[in-house]
Image (cartoon, rainbow, N blue to C red):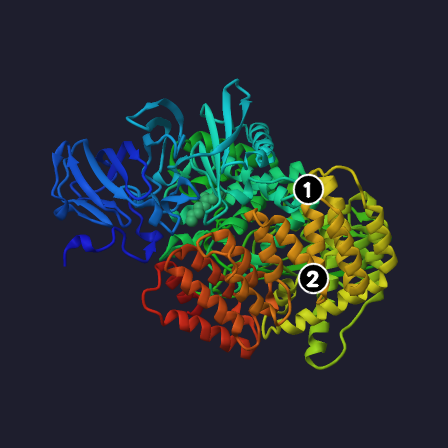
Amino acid sequence: MSAHLEPAHAHPVRLADYRPADYLIDAVDLDISLDRQATRVISRLSLRPNPKGAAGAPLILDGGGLNPVRALLDNETLDLAEVATPDRLTIANPPARPFTLEVETLLDPSANTQLEGLYRSGSAYCTQCEAEGFRRIAFYLDRPDVLSVFTTRIEADKAEAPVLLSNGNLVESGEAGPGRHYAIWRDPHPKPCYLFALVGGDLDSIHDEFTTASGRKVALGIYTEKNKHHRAHYAMESLIHAMRWDEFVYGREYDLDVFNIVAVSDFNMGAMENKGLNIFNDKYILARSETATDADFANIEGVVAHEYFHNWTGNRITCRDWFQLCLKEGLTVYRDQEFSADQRSRAVGRIANVRALRASQFPEDAGPLAHNVRPEVYNEINNFYTSTVYEKGAEIIRMLRCLIGHDAYHAGMDLYFNRFDGQAVTIEDFISCFAESSGRDLTDFFRWYTQAGTPKLSARGSYDPAAKTYTLDLSQETKPTPGQPDKKPLVMPIRLGLIGADGKEIPLIQDNPASPREAKFGIFELAGQSRRIVLNNVPSKPVPSLLRRFSAPVILDVDLTEDDLLLLIAHDTDPFNRWQAAQTFATRLLIRSTKLIREGEMPEFSETFAEALGALIDDCDADPAFTAEIVNLPSEADIARDIGSDVDPDAIQMARDAFRADLGKYLWHRLLAVYESLTSDAPYSPDAVSSGRRALRNACLSLLAAGDPGAGAEIAMRQFQLVANMTDQFAALKVLSLISAPERERALDSFFRAHASDALVVNKWFTVQATIPEPQTLERVRRLTKNHSFSLANPNRVYALIGAFANANPTGFNAADGAGYRFVAEMALKLDATNPQVAARLISSFRSWRNLEAGRRAQARAALETMAAKENLSPDLRDIVGRALA
Ligand code: B3K
Ligand code: ZN
């Protein structure tokens, strides 16, 4: 067999097999002439043997379905039949000195439905190269540790693509023959090819300027499809805030003369941090009060900041290999979370982060798709852009910061930036900076990266009234995950407080504190399997407030009574734990009710809990956003996760609905009073305080409608018809969608008619329908896939309809007859032929199938097996299905 029929990298790819590249590419000159079906790419690579590679090795460049038409080595023509296949270019005996390789290829961007490489979105040309998309543009050493200086000449029809953008600074532009023009961009910062980007199109834009702390003027631009630029102002403001914040908090300045963002409507993920030219899914850029909700505004702020922050954490210092993905992602998520916390309410931000972590990362870690934050093997790297790598990766940085403190954390970051700037590095390199700055041995802490699964932290307290001591016994345990039967203890910071029966905080006094941070801040470390903490001078039996601010991403098992929880709800000085206590109270009750319902009994209600919520509602002026978080009960997925096995989603749904209905009735007058008191005719503003008031008002509306659907529908309909902002309008539509009455269809129709031409709003219309928890929803979703505005070619549409059904409609997706599973599998198979990445993402909704009751488990398995039995599955889908079944 000819050697070049094999892929350049054998699969599976293993971390243990990492070797440096045999060749380096010092410079890349790209000459790209855009055409809808026949784009011509000429790449000139300046290569040389890597002193760290194998001398005399063949040069093997990655390709992704390329169509080469010409290749020259140092100006000598090569025989293409001999050196190239669509997926690989091999030079058997390259010179043992610097040389150039020039290759011309022809691409068809219009036929690129995978949205990886160079493709068309609307009338524009754009690119997505991370992780391995650059090889679909040119033959290359497509790996993050090959850094090169890129110069890109783009040529296009002036009328079709008046705007031509790439990385770096614009160095030249002009005419290029009849009707054509060109632009040359040069990026002086060596970068891996996954950060390459190019955009061409007839785009509108807004512009601003930023002056860095040291006086560099940066021209900022945000480009959108025609006539959408007036919706990019909030994104621009967010960008400027993010740039200032990174200077202020991390001392990091921007390093080019321009920073451009382009928003496109066809994009597989959220956004991409290409050097100096971020490309975004337009849902994370475009917002006006009439089209975007408060949540959309908050997401825009967070994602714009995230991509900007990558300039230092990801671009200037990048990953040695894709196993190190969380080096840039976990760190950058942590940075964007902290940025958002500084812009908004820190407590509410933390609650939102933890809700998201528990909703997606905990289930991932508890199921067949569990993997290390730093995986050790992959078949398809695109399947590892997971909440484990991102969100759990961010939690690790947060713990590190908590363990070593502000000063050592920032000293470590400075060391990291100084030592590794311009390099492609590993997690070990990163962590070594903090070992140095803190003087601590972080070997055991490192286990967070190499061990999957969510640890369970158990805490048992006992009070000795004679000695006035409180003893807390802590222990940890992590269940086995696929391929990791034996788990070791992890090092975790446990932020602790004690609340006395009078509701006052009790000082923590120990004979021999293990560290100054323990004595000063109540941050205790659990490093081994267990630990006993004895606290002195405790005047009366206290209630422990453990894991304040959720100081470690673990499942907490603590034997608090209902009275203890009520005390924490009312008095904990840590807002996160006040919220947590309410969640715990409600979850316990809902789990009991779920069980009762399955046994044919009536669900429970708790007047005491309702009164506690009532007191918070009466006292909501202090922080309405926080009160809203408390009023929003644990989700069905939260309850399912805590039940853990033999899960019956229908019973959970019934328990939750019944409790909400009882709460709505019980608190009716107080809810209505707050709803009315928060009604405002002030002009819309997306700021945290105003959005918090809307959040609480809409949470009240939702409970009112649960308590009395008739009266609730009336209030919701009035709100739906009266308000101009999308937050309140969509919240009302959501409430109406849950009520099976004629108002529902009337509201849905009028919403669609009002927004039919606005894709991002129509996505909301798809989602609200896909998440109606009733048996007829699957039929509705099937019907909607035939709607003229639905298309499998647009990832946002797929996520809005099919993704929402699979991930946010637990009773629909998990219908007992398996119809939901079969539908999602059918859609994924259909999509797999054109966009495997999005198909694979849809199927991650099966990640918890093993926890279901036996009947549904069998149905889910059957749906997965139907997929597994297909020939011609993409590597992406084959990998997810295979791991889900393994
Ligand atoms: N780094 C990109 C994600 C790339 C996805 C590749 N399939 C966005 C981000 O995390 O910032
Ligand atoms: Zn990122």
Identity of the residue drawn at 47% across and 34% down: 203
Residue 206: name its quadrant.
Answer: top right
Chain-order first, disc 2 or disc 1:
1
Percent x, y of residue 785: 51, 62
Q: Nearer the viewer, mark 2 or mark 1?
A: 2
> Does 197 sit left or right of 474 as displayed?
left
> Does 25 sit left or right of 291 as displayed?
left
* Label 1, residues with CA under 10 Å away: few <14, some 14-19, many ≥20: some
Q: Quadrant of the C terminus?
A: bottom left
Q: Which amino acid type is shown beneath numbered disc 1?
A: Arg
Percent x, y of residue 792: 45, 57
Q: Where 243 falls versus 654 (above or below)?
A: above
> Does 468 sit left or right of 313 as displayed?
right
* Nearer to the camera, 840 or 348: 840
Q: Which residue was labeled with disc 2?
A: 744
Q: CA distance from mark 2 to mark 1?
A: 36 Å
Identity of the residue drawn at 27% across and 34% down: 25
Q: Which residue was labeled with disc 1?
A: 346
Image mark for residue 815:
none
Confirm whether residue 539 shows in the render: no
Q: Where 126 falls versus 617 (above or below)?
A: above
Q: Secondary structure at mark 1?
A: helix
Identity of the residue drawn at 77% across and 46% down: 624
* Nearer to the camera, 187 or 157: 157
> Does 613 sit left or right of 796 as displayed?
right
Identity of the residue drawn at 21% across and 44% down: 68
Percent x, y of residue 441: 50, 44
Q: Which amino acid type is shown beneath numbered disc 2?
A: Arg
